[in-house]
Image: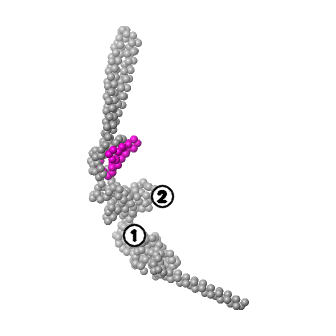
Amino acid sequence: MPTFTNKNSFKIAVTAALVLALAGGAYLYLRGGKQAESYRTAKPTRGEIVSTVTSSGNITPVVSVSVGAAVSGTIKELFVDFNSPVKKGQIIAQIDPATFRAQVEQSKGNYLAAQANLDKAKVTLADTTRTMNRYKDLVKDGSVSVSDYDTYATAAASAKAALGAAQGTVAQAKGSFDQARTNLDYATIRSPVDGIVISRAVDVGQTVAASFTTPTLFTIAQDLTKMQIYATVDESDIGKIKEGGNATFTVDAYPESNFSGVVTQVRNAATTVSNVVTYTVVVGVDNSDLKLKPGMTANVTFITAKKADALKIPTAALRFRPKTADAAGADKDGARVAAKAAGKGGGGKKIYLLKDGLPVAVTITLGIGNDKETEVAGGGLPADAEVIIEAVAAKGKNGASKSGSSAGGPPMGPRL
């Protein structure tokens, strides 16, 4: 029995020793991992900083006119094509006029017949009026009866009414005649402006129907040397953009070139798509060299503010947040610095500086900025501060470095 007890005691002692050894190994492994953690940092710099808002939109002519057909018919001839320059009043297409000419002749015949009937009604009225007047005089001396006079008076009144009806028929026939001539004129399509054809939607022999809507045959740009961009801007940024402000943009056709423009209009009408509210900003563009084509997609950058000598840090530093347990203590160590900065009016954004190998929180006031860099407007940030951009974890067994960054941006600054 004593032998059994000693064996159990021995097993318990061995098990406890193994547990302690494993716990110690895990502690040393984790502790060593923390000690191996390092950070990418960058020092504040001074220089010019530009605040921007980015967007995209399509390039369009300032004035473009859609030329349609007011009558239905078959396209008989086309006199212009894509990129053809045109003058105001120039014939650009012809719808087969045969049907319209026949309608003109028919309506003209109806009009002439109505005029002839009108003349006949005038003669009839004149004859019945004379007869009525003659019988009126004879009634006075008793040569004819009153009933005979009444008969001719009724005939005169009827002739007068017939004259009015004939005049109405003439007016109706003239309207039909004028409409037929107008439709014949509409069969000849003319350019309403000086410009250049940028779109043609029909071919010879094609039938166009203008029963309910006017079909578009051509699109004519009045002046391709003056273009504009309709850019969509998010509601959070629209307040920064003002009419008369500068903008730059690029297009895929010329990736190496930067073009410039001026904000000509900030429209108040909002567009909501999937609960995202945007506004349209119109940018005027000089296209004297005709490099820009209608319909190109422009990547626009609006310049909203600029400073020549600003203290700036990488924007990625604003997104960094430490994940280690030491950071909690570092926040306590940096509380006094943060409070001091907030007391100076720097209570804005918390960033982390590297001190004694640990991140220390500091609160600063932000100024203008963009996706790459942000101005430090206040908070007492030292000029030689090491601003943390991201955390870099220890190397694994295979020698690969594991990044623990929470900055959300590309690595920046020297590696410690």
* Image point (52%, 82%), residue name: 29
Q: Which residue ends up furthest to the front in the rendered image?
A: 205
In-image side of 403 versus 15 (left or right): left
For the residue marked with disc 2, what is the amino acid?
Asn
Percent coordinates x, y for residue 392 in the rendering = 46, 77
The three-letter code of the residue at mark 1 reads Lys
Magenta-highlighted residues: 193-219
Q: What SS does tag 1 mark?
A: loop
Per the image, the residue denoted by label 1 is: 372
Q: Is residue 312 above or below residue 97?
A: below
> Which of the 4 quarters of the picture holds residue 150?
top left
Between residue 301 and residue 340, name the one nearer to us. Answer: 301
Residue 232: percent from the left, percent from the top? 40, 58
Q: Nearer the viewer, residue 169 or 266?
A: 169
Q: Residues within 10 Å of mark 2 (few under 14, many from 20)?
A: few
Disc marking residue 105: none
Quadrant housing residue 227: bottom left
Find disc 2 in the rendering and name its residue: 275
Q: Residue at x 39, y 41 (%)?
A: 211
